[in-house]
Amino acid sequence: MNKEVLDFVMEKTHELIDAATCSSETKAAAESWLAAVGTDREAEETKNYVAELEEDIMPIDTLIAFAESDAGAQVFGADAAGVAAHAKEIKSAGANYCDCPACNVVAEILEKKELLLK
């Protein structure tokens, strides 16, 4: 992987770890990947990291369904209807994924997926 891509993904990975909406699983995968950069574990950890990112990014339709569910009401509380409305709005504008801080960073990293996995 070239240095420019590596530097970009490392910077974005730190942003992801710091994002309030980053799941504990994704945070652990990010930290493992960062620890493996430059070691003989880097290629394996990169595959694991990308797989976790792909699993964790929330498709917009999933977000809408969740926000409108009883479980979503428990997570988002009084904001659930607003979250669903916002998700529908960004979907109508062409969004494929949730636009929370973590999902935004994950999408940016996944844009470099092919270069990461080289």
Image (tube, rainbow, N blue to C red):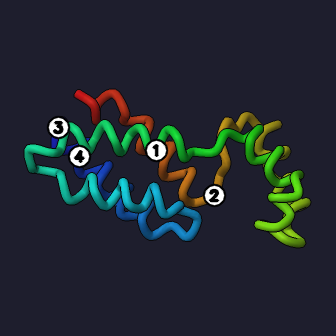
Q: Quadrant of the C terminus?
A: top left
The reply to whether the C-beta atoms of the residues labelled 4 and 1 are less than 8 Å apart is: no
Q: What residue does disc 3 label?
A: 2
Q: Nearer the viewer, mark 3 or mark 2?
A: 2
Identify the residue under disc 1.
Answer: 53
Q: Which residue is mark 2?
A: 100
Q: Residues within 10 Å of mark 4 (few under 14, many from 20)?
A: some
Relative height, residue 40 to residue 13 (above, below) = above
Marks 4 and 1, Cα distance to the nearest angstrom?
A: 16 Å
**Pointers 3 and 4 in contact (CB under 8 A)?**
yes
Name the element at disc 2.
Answer: loop
* Residue at 55% over, 51% down: 104
Q: Residues within 10 Å of mark 1 (few under 14, many from 20)?
A: many
Q: Nearer the viewer, residue 37 or 112?
A: 37
Which residue appears at 28% of the width and 41% of the height?
Answer: 46
Residue in the foreground of this view, choosing between 3 and 24: 24
Q: Which amino acid does the dot numbered 2 rest on?
A: Cys
In which quadrant of the rendered view does residue 40 lie? top left
The type of residue carrying mark 1 is Leu
Q: Which mark is residue 109?
A: none
Q: What secondary structure is found at the residue carrying circle 1?
A: helix
* Sequence order check, earlier mark of 3 and 2: 3
Q: How many marks?
A: 4
Q: Position of residue 56 (x, y in %)?
A: 54, 47
Distance Cα–Cα, label 3 vs label 2: 28 Å
Q: Nearer the viewer, mark 3 or mark 1?
A: 1
In the rendered image, residue 22, in percent from the top left (x then y), is placed at 52, 62
Tag 4: residue type? Leu
Identify the secondary structure beneath mark 4.
Answer: helix
Residue drawn where x is 9% and y is 49% of the image:
39
* Tag 4 residue: 6
